[in-house]
Amino acid sequence: MYAAEICTDIALGTVMVTEDILLLLQFYLTPHLLDSKLTPTGTFFIFALFASAGFTFIYFYVPETKGLSEKEKKELFMPGAKWGRKLKTEEVRTLSHMVSSLRDLSEEF
């Protein structure tokens, strides 16, 4: 649900393909893990560890989107935006160069 809220463009397709690949991998590995020396208990313990790690990551690193506009949601992970990470020095130089290039182009038209 979070991916559909944040990725409103081509990124959503990338997220969905990645999720499908991971689900297929889980689908094909589960029978082999159940038949191995891990037993069903060990297999589901491994899945519980992955689920716990995922929950911990989401709790600490995925930002809240409640009350944000579409623009602000897109800026969540955009470097240099209000909600995004700070720009690195080389990125600031590149960004200022891009802005000056855009100004030059707009003056031509």
Image (tube, rainbow, N blue to C red):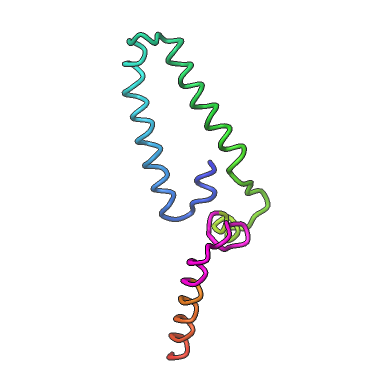
Name above or below for residue 99 compared with residue 70. below
Residue 15 on image: x %, y %: 42, 44
- Residue 49, image x and y in percent? 51, 23
Q: Residue furthest bottom?
A: 108
Residue at x 49%, y 84% (from the top left corner): 103
Measured as percent of width and height from the top left, residue 51 is found at 51, 27
* Vertical relation: 18 (above or below) 75: above
Q: Please give left or right for residue 86 compared with residue 21 in the image.
A: right
Count of all numbered marks drawn on residues in the image: 0
> With respect to residue 96, does 39 lie above or below?
above
Quadrant where the image shows the C terminus? bottom left
Q: Is residue 38 magenta?
A: no
Can you name the residue that lies furthest to the right here? 67
Q: Main secondary structure of the magenta part?
A: loop
In the picture as drawn, the residue positioned furthest to the front comes out as: 89
- Of residues 51 and 3, the one nearer the viewer is 51
Residue 62 at what x, y percent from top left?
58, 43
Q: Nearer the viewer, residue 14 or 53?
A: 53
Residue at 46% over, 22% down: 47
Range covered by the magenta-colored residues: 77-94
Tell me what residue is drawn at x 51 percent, y 21 percent. 48
Q: Quadrant of residue 52?
A: top right
The magenta stretch spans residue 84: yes
Q: Is residue 97 above or below residue 22?
A: below
